[in-house]
Amino acid sequence: MPFLLSSRESVFIKMVLVEFRGFLGNIMAFLDREEAAKRAKGEDAPRARLTLRRDCRRLSLKLDGILNHAFFIDLPRPTVLPLGSPVLQRKAGYREIWRAGARNVATLYEYWLFFELEELFREKFKCTEELHSLLVEKANGITRMKLKRGVEMGTPAQGVWSEKAHRQLSAHFHFNKKFNRRQDNGAFSSWTRNVQPDYTISIWPTAFTPDEAEENELMVHIHFDAKYRVTTLNGFEPPKDGDDEAIQDQASAGEEETGIRSTAAKYSDLLKMHAYRDAIRRTGGAYVLYPGNSDHEPFRSNFHEILPGLGAFSIRPASSGKAQGITVLSEFLDQVIDHLSNRTTAHERSTYHLGESLSLKEEPVQYGKRILPEKDQFDITRRAVPPEEHKVLVVWSFDESQLTRWKEHQIAHVRLGDRPGGLVVDLEVAAVRHLLVRRGEKVLMGLLKLASRDFTVLTGAEMFKVYGIKASKPDGIYAVFKVEEDSGILSEKPESAKIWPLIQRKALEKSYRFLNPRRSADPVVLSLRSILDALAKDK
């Protein structure tokens, strides 16, 4: 081999060839064990494995021949790796071997993690078939393995995977799935830029198709990104809070005992997870996977539940061939499965209302100079409910004497049923916060504010006895509300011509209206938003 020089570069070349030969030996030993296990079961080894073993043996013998050359026998073991040497990078022969061993380590880590995650996915989601799709490509005469990217691999797994809740779920495992920018709220999309996490696990209820799950905000994407970069905990950015200081102290103590400096995920990589969380629709969590040695990596949840969340997992190859740190990730997936299997979580409720609000696509109401309250009228420590959920009950005043009695006792009533035992309390009636008084098509005054959440249920005869108000039906059942004038939202009497069509439309939505159209005194509930919208429009 005349191109080799007796130098530290040549020592490096010998080391690379010895490593290659050792790697091939490990592969052949593994295949021998697999073949022996197959024979013990009376099975034949797959042809592809036999071909692989033959190729490994051929390459190993070739390397043995090269390493037995007198030139290599006399070379010492390396004491330094001259990776920046111009001889390695430019001189013929050295350059080819240096490049052959210079496969992008980050890509190798990404591929290794893929197989670890695929195995973990199949274990957690009871998926028996392999999901990956391999390609073999040749570039410049070098054969390389390549994973097929941007595809949904295998049939989605389906089943009940949680012991705590028996919800039927489906799951998909993606490698380099691209989430394209879309203006609408469509499936597998980003609302800012095209993004492409390394690995994505998508989970949704089996009762829905994937597209239906996305439309109903039931799809949950969990993203993982392989980052072959670490930083020492003592250099971790940004300024530490109390929790991080505890982690620092714990890590420093461990370093003193073991002599090994703890490492963590790069801060910039964690910020990228924030980008995934914010940009990709229906993302439940985004996490860095890195080859560090820290068991104290901070994990963050957006509130008290595991999702939405963000963080990092330290996963690295061990000499045994197993993945160190994969147990922590496995336990995390167990918690995610339990969380998504339970329909009583805050996450489930929040996504329901998010899907509802996104589907409405309503323009904001321009309500002019009217000042809407900031605080809840029944609890000033809480924010006021949105105008769409702020319910206004339309009540009927038969004559002036009845209206006078209402003002005298600061009450108003509405019929709930025609006889004892015939209560009809709509959910919207229970959520009422204001009353609107009408007679026929005319609105008589501004909004009346409920003084308390509760109301009294009386028969017509009892109401006459207590308040001196004569009801239309003595044996009817009535809800009596305590009210007071409201000087805020709508103190002035609104235009009846704008409100009456709204009352008519709402009344026609009730099914009983078609059966008995004469029951005009039945309660009608409007949203404050609809009233403000009607008043803002021209006649």
Image (cartoon, rainbow, N blue to C red):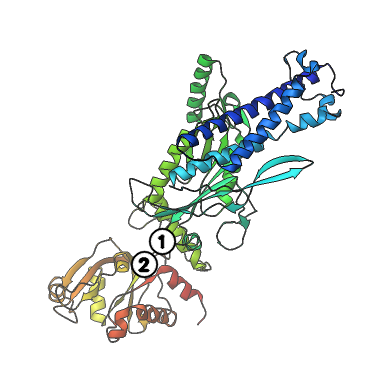
| Kind of residue sitting beneath label 1 | Ala
Locate the N terminus by quadrant.
top right
**Nearest the camera: 510 or 266?**
266
- Within 10 Å of disc 2 (Cα), the crowding (few <14, some 14-19, many 20+) is many
Write down the residue under mark 2: 391
Q: Position of residue 218 (x, y in %)?
A: 45, 57
Report if the CB atoms under discs 2 and 1 are less than 8 Å apart: no
Q: Mark 2 falls on what kind of element?
A: strand
Q: Of all residues shown, which one is farthest toward the bottom?
A: 518
Which label number is shown at residue 272? none
Q: Residue at x 75, y 13 (%)?
A: 76
Relative height, residue 415 to residue 317 (above, below): below
Using the rendered view, name the quadrant where residue 168 is placed. Answer: bottom left
Q: Of all residues shown, which one is farthest toward the front?
A: 42
Q: Is residue 94 left or right of residue 61?
A: right
Q: Residue at x 44, y 80 (%)?
A: 498
Q: Position of residue 422 (x, y in %)?
A: 18, 74
Which label number is shown at residue 207? 1
Closer to the camera: disc 2 or disc 1? 1
Q: Is residue 290 left or right of residue 345?
A: right
Q: Is residue 118 left or right of residue 463?
A: right
| Kind of residue sitting beneath label 2 | Lys
Q: Position of residue 134 (x, y in %)?
A: 62, 46
Q: Residue at x 47, y 66 (%)?
A: 370
Q: Mark 1 falls on what kind of element?
A: loop
Q: Position of residue 61 (x, y in %)?
A: 70, 27
